[in-house]
Image (cartoon, rainbow, N blue to C red):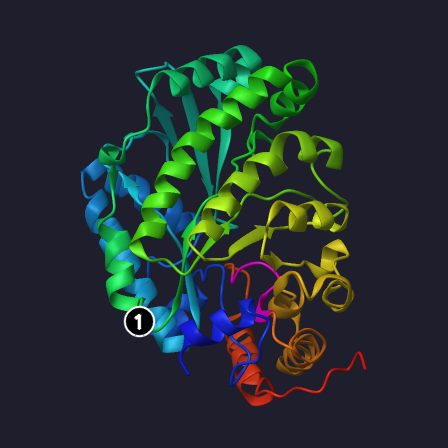
Amino acid sequence: MNGKERVKLAFAHQEADRVPVMALSIDNPTAAHVLGRSTLCGFGGRVRGVAQNQALMAGTHHEYHQRKLSDEIELYCALDLDCWGEANPIPCNPLVPEQVEENAWRFSDPATGLWQLYRFMPESDAYDQVDSSLRQEGLPALERLTESMEANTPNLEDWDFTFVDMALREMGDDLFLLAYADIDLGSTWDWAEHFLIGLIQAPDLIHRYLDAQLRTTLMLLEAMLERGFDGVLGGTDWASQKGPMFSPRHFNKFVFPRLKQITDLCHRYGVPYIKHTDGNVNSLLDGMIATGVDGFQAIEPVAGMDIAQIKRHYGDRLTLIGNVDCAHTLVNGTVEDVRKETENVIRVAAPGGGFVLSTSNSVHPGVKPELYLAMLQTAREVGTYPIQDRNH
């Protein structure tokens, strides 16, 4: 049985030969440790920020993506993982940044006059948008951005699917491959304050902004589904450790109706939709399921997300993907700590299917390679079906 078959059975809430394993992303140093060389794998700032911006400025963006995907194919095959994602086409004419400091780049859109400033933090390997027109100007800038998106009809000819097709060609027979689509909320950016104010003071503008984004999202998603992807992943975070970034009432008004358009499209093509989010989303789980979400990835223990409890309450309707703790256990624990936690997660969440093992987020730069490899080894040792359920 290969990875594609295992994950399909998990989403059918059936048991495969063993528990399937996936990774949201795998950053250096784990990727470099496994392959024995530097890589462009994962979501770390050196890869996603520094290397990509250098390629954009040098006119070698295509070569950057070629190497990144080649590295990830080699890595996921070396680790014998069952699922890979998330695939996205790239813009044919991406914005080229101006490097304004050693670790800072400014992106400016000549069509709108809007700009964003990104900064790389070497000590944490983080790369984030730290300033922008939207942060400085607030809702008037969001109005300009929205008007620009509304005035331009999305066009597939503006997107390059070369590496999407390469992923399908190289891994599509053996691994469960995920495309990407989500509602890109302003509450996750540097201008979050203005987005949250807009929910109350300018709801019509927020609706227009989200709808303008959704047009492009649905266009690209359908093109990906036509190509034969096995599932779709959305990665926009919804919550902090204490709870959602805004009220469930506003999720019902602004997020869930649009997310349902994405899940409905996935289901028309017969594929599941997986929602990744950090944080405590216990108050959103019912709405998430009602929207049509099929899988939930992360399930952070440090945010009060109890995978055993979620399995008991929602396991017949939601495939759970998680949740070995990558905030503490895989960073500061021992091999024995990892083995015990991995075995416990499998015992409480895997019986009956509807489960894929992963970390509680990603394999980020702070994860120790030897601990992640211990997690995978333990999964191979104790994850063979049938598994005795500790809940009974």
Residue furthest right in the image: 392
Q: Callout 1: helix, strand or loop?
A: loop
* Residue 242 in the image, given as x and y percentages of width and height: 77, 45
Where does label 1 land, which residue? 173
Of all residues, the one furthest to the front in this rendering is 268
User: Which residues fall within the magenta stretch?
Assistant: 355-363
Coordinates of residue 287 in the picture (x, y in percent): 70, 45
Instruction: Tell me: 99 left or right of 290.
Output: left
Q: Is residue 16 above or below residue 129?
A: below
| Placement of 66 over or under 189, stated as above or below | below
Query: What's the amino acid at mark 1?
Result: Asp
How many residues crowd mark 1 within 10 Å: few (<14), some (14–19), many (20+)? few
Question: Image quadrant of residue 308?
Answer: bottom right
Q: Where is the C terminus found, in terms of image quarters?
A: bottom right
Residue 357: say if magenta. yes
Residue found 27% across the figure and 36% down from its top: 156
Viewer-proximal residue, 190 or 10? 10
User: Looking at the image, which residue is at 38% across and 70% down?
Assistant: 175
User: Is residue 37 among the parts visible in the rendering?
Assistant: no
Q: Position of residue 367 (x, y in %)?
A: 55, 65
Residue 368 appears in the figure: yes
Query: Dividing the image into 4 quarters, which one contains the N terminus?
Result: bottom left
Q: Let me know if residue 88 is in the magenta part.
A: no
Looking at the image, residue 86 sits to the left or right of residue 391; the answer is left
